[in-house]
Amino acid sequence: MSGNGLPILPFIRISIVAFLDPKDITKQANIKEGMIVADFGSGSGFRTIPIAHAVGRSGRVYALDIQKEMLEVVRGKAKADHLLNVYTIWADLESPNGSTLKDDYTDHVVVANILFQADDKDAVAKEAFRILKSKGTASVVEWDISAGVLGPPKEQLIDKAKTKEVFTAAGFIWDKEFYTGEHHYGLLFKKS
């Protein structure tokens, strides 16, 4: 008992969940000043804004999402950070030419936490391949099946092997795996 009559509870150690810092994707993908990057499934801009800072004024970032309200949030964050290099596109990435971007246009594509939601995962990979320049790269980040209780239900998740299969079938060459925290995996692909 403590001095105030309450029981003393044993110290419980709570670990902070290690999620990927969006700046880590930028670093792992070698995103640099002047690049054109597409952020598939941008959501509220968690990755988009740090990428926009990395590519600078001479680069561009396209935030693509199917939820229009999320794109409004991205626009607001870009405006608050005085970023003039962020462009939002309402997109169905499972449709042919769903991004509306030109063929062979981007230097890098980020595909993060959307494959598990996609009915047509192949279409998403093909769209990333279509808009990517020759020698361009794509980083894919997804929930790891071993993530435990966090994240979507396990039956919805896509494992690393299946992700590699989907992206290589679309024409990509697998390059490397990169660390994305305890609950995700990251894969880097190249377009030859």
Image: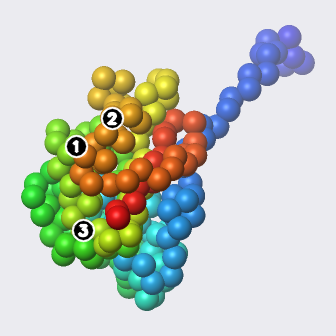
Count the marks. 3
Q: Which sits in the foreground, 7 or 148?
A: 148
Residue 12 shows up from this direction: yes
Q: CA distance from mark 2 to mark 3?
A: 22 Å
Compared to residue 72, the image places residue 126 above or below, namely above
**Mark 3 or 1, nearer chain start:** 1
Q: In the image, what residue type sits under mark 2? A: Lys
Which disc number belongs to residue 121?
A: 1
Which disc number belongs to residue 162?
A: 2
Q: Which sits in the foreground, 163 or 77?
A: 163
Residue 82 shows up from this direction: no
Q: Is residue 163 left or right of residue 120?
A: right
Q: CA distance from mark 3 to mark 1?
A: 16 Å
Q: Quadrant of the C terminus?
A: bottom left
Which disc number belongs to residue 131?
A: 3
**Mark 1 or 2, nearer chain start:** 1
